[in-house]
Amino acid sequence: MPASPAAPRFGEAVIVWARIAALSFGGPAGQIAVMHRILVEEKRWLGERRFLHALNYCMLLPGPEAQQLAIYIGWLMHRTLGGLVAGLLFILPGFVAIIGLSIVYMLLGDSGPVAALFFGLKAAVLVVVAQAVIRLGGRILHRRALLAIAAAAFVGLFVLGAPFPLIILLAGLIGFFGGRAGLEAFAPKAAHGPSGTGVAEEDTVLGEGTPAHTRPDLAWALRIAGVVLVLWLGPVLALGLSLGWDNVFTQIAVFFSKMAVVTFGGAYAVLAYVAQEAVQTFGWLAPGEMLDGLGMAETTPGPLIMVTQFVGFMGAARGASGLDPLWAGVLGGVLTTWVTFAPCFLWIFLGAPFVERLRGARALNAALQAITAAVVGVILNLAIWFGMHVLFTEVRAVSLAGLTIDLPVLGSVDTPSLLLTLAAAVAAFGFKVGVIPLMLGCALAGLALHGAGLLV
């Protein structure tokens, strides 16, 4: 039996978290796999069971589960300061990269070469989202009831235009009461997560015991919750009272604060909600620009939900009055990131000490399973929405059976985009090309098409 490793000093832990942050490409699956490899297999800070238990708890929460897992493990190892450092370092590289790319996009986005790069990225993003639908659907929709929930979620969004939070709430309630009633359709599944080497708890830094600082303490939980709530919602209230509730900065703060509490199911799920509101309700950016932002998030480290930073940047740059658009955009991006990620610390610091009570909670696990099934339908809606705006130059609202549905004008197909998307699909599905090489290849293909004079 190998000897248990020595507990890392705080400075050593900071270096480890910085390394994880720099390697956090590829969406939540890739990020969780990196954390598992470094923290469980390499450093042996914690064992397989504790890692998966923490992951299951983070999956129950709104927000980016990979970043919340980093906060959780940082808190386990070095208390509140450890959680803060782990969570902030996890998003820092992506934050800096997206701010820089947003500035370039605003200043040079209309120039031929830059526009060609993002033209290529759009095709890759569409294929990546389609992959997410197939991958998640294959793993989750193993029962007819879950398939029905996914189908209902898609119809609710695409046909009926139902709000995303309502879809998630109804799916969660169906799963909760179905699990509580003991229905076989909502029977618990084995936890999904990275398959590791099965590192035993007794061979790790944390061991099998429960650190003293992780035991439930209601008074401490209420104090930390109060502090985080003030830090999160204080700026929102201050903006509303000082600038007015119709000001673009206030709208950004309120919208993304609301989004932060309904973002179950990962980044692709919430992007449908963000796209619907940012494009159609607020008019902060166009559908194609939403895809450009997702391309930025896919090719930089950090959570995919960092695309919201680009949305806030563009919304503030175009909607703020009395400020230079560039500085307004930077402030909008910072504000968006703050209200999006601050709640993640609240969920962990408030709930993690009580997480042991969630073990074996059948109804809660069934609710999560139903929400995840609905997310498949939500991502399918996102894929079709993106596809219409990538492959066609014109989309119109059409009335069918008393309902208004957005459909593409078939005669407006964008041939270069269609051909590039088909090539990206062959590369991804046929040759198993990874996300980053796919993005880079499509971006270069966009430049080549521009150089050949095939892009308008």
Image (spheres, grey):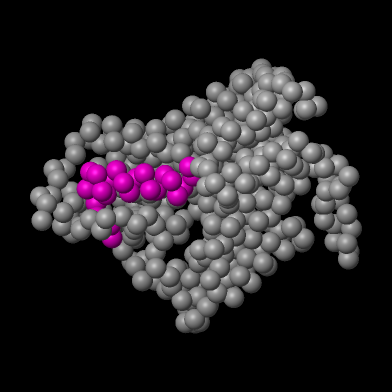
Q: Is residue 191 above or below residue 305?
A: below
In the depicted structure, whether residue 334 falls above or below residue 357: above
Q: Is residue 42 magenta?
A: yes
Q: Is residue 299 magenta?
A: no
Q: Quadrant of residue 310?
A: top right
Write the residue at 56% across / 32% down: 440
Q: Quadrant of residue 170?
A: bottom right
| Quadrant in the picture for the C terminus | top right
Viewer-proximal residue, 400 or 440?
A: 440
Residue that sits furthest to the front in the current view = 431
Who's the residue at 69% across and 32% down the image?
119
In the image, 230 versus 122, the foreground residue is 122
What secondary structure is the magenta-colored segment mainly?
helix
Picture coordinates of residue 153, whole percent (x, y): 66, 63
In the picture, measured across the screen, residue 38 lies left or right of residue 233, that is left
Q: Position of residue 262 (x, y in %)?
A: 56, 54
The span shown in magenta is 26-49
Point 67% across, 29% down: residue: 446
> Foreground: 421 or 305?
421
Residue displayed at 54% across by 63% down: 138
Q: Is residue 320 visible?
A: no
Q: Nearer the viewer, residue 185 or 421?
A: 421
Where residue 180 sits in the image (x, y, percent)?
47, 78
